[in-house]
């Protein structure tokens, strides 16, 4: 079962969030050979994708047991403010998919533009 973590960021800013993953023994997971993907949507059932981050598009980076998500100010400026939902999945080298994290994604509206 995925862990729940809510994200709240400011529209129009540069943001980088590291997610550290640990095994049952509280040791960092070895994510060597894994890919990661993350989608943000208005709701879980929505077909609209508000934003998509992957290791392939360079917006998710894996190092050791950490996955770092990155948003530039141009990306956060173009996103619709308000509450969304997200999840992050990791994909092993043999194609096994595991959802590791999920929650609310809140983009607080920018005043200074």
Image: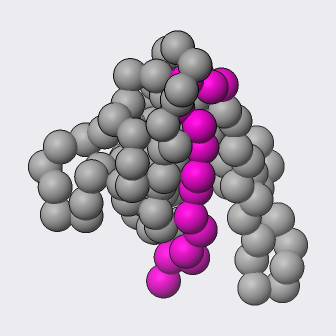
Q: Furthest residue to the left?
A: 47
> In the displayed structure, would residue 49 be above or below residue 30?
above
Could you tell whether 53 is left or right of 51 in the image? right
Q: Residue at x 38, y 22 (%)?
A: 78
Q: Furthest residue to the front?
A: 111
- The percent coordinates of residue 97 (x first, y second) are 41, 63
43 magenta-colored? no
Total numbered badges shown on the rendered structure: 0
- The percent coordinates of residue 93 (x first, y second) are 50, 50
> In the displayed structure, would residue 73 be above or below residue 8?
above
Q: Is residue 37 visible?
A: no
> In the displayed structure, would residue 67 be above or below residue 100?
above
In the image, the segment drawn in magenta is 1-14
Q: Residue at x 34, y 35 (%)?
A: 80
Q: Is residue 40 visible?
A: yes
Could you tell whether 20 is left or right of 82 in the image? right
* Foreground pick, 15 / 68: 15
Q: Residue at x 58, y 56 (%)?
A: 7
- The percent coordinates of residue 109 (x first, y second) are 48, 37
Could you tell whether 51 is left or right of 10 in the image? left
* Foreground pick, 48 / 33: 48
Q: Give residue 10's quadrant in the image.
A: top right
């Amino acid at each position: 079962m995925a862990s729940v973590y809510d994200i709240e960021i400011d529209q129009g800013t540069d943001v980088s969030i590291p997610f550290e993953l640990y095994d049952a023994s509280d040791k960092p997971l070895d994510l060597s050979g894994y890919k990661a993907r993350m989608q943000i949507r208005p709701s879980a059932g929505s077909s609209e994708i508000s934003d998509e981050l992957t290791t392939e598009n360079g917006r998710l980076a894996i190092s050791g047991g950490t996955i770092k998500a990155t948003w530039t100010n141009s990306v956060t400026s173009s996103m619709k403010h308000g509450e969304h939902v997200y999840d992050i999945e990791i994909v092993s080298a043999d194609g096994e998919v595991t959802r590791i994290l999920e929650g609310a994604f809140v983009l607080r509206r920018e005043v200074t533009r």
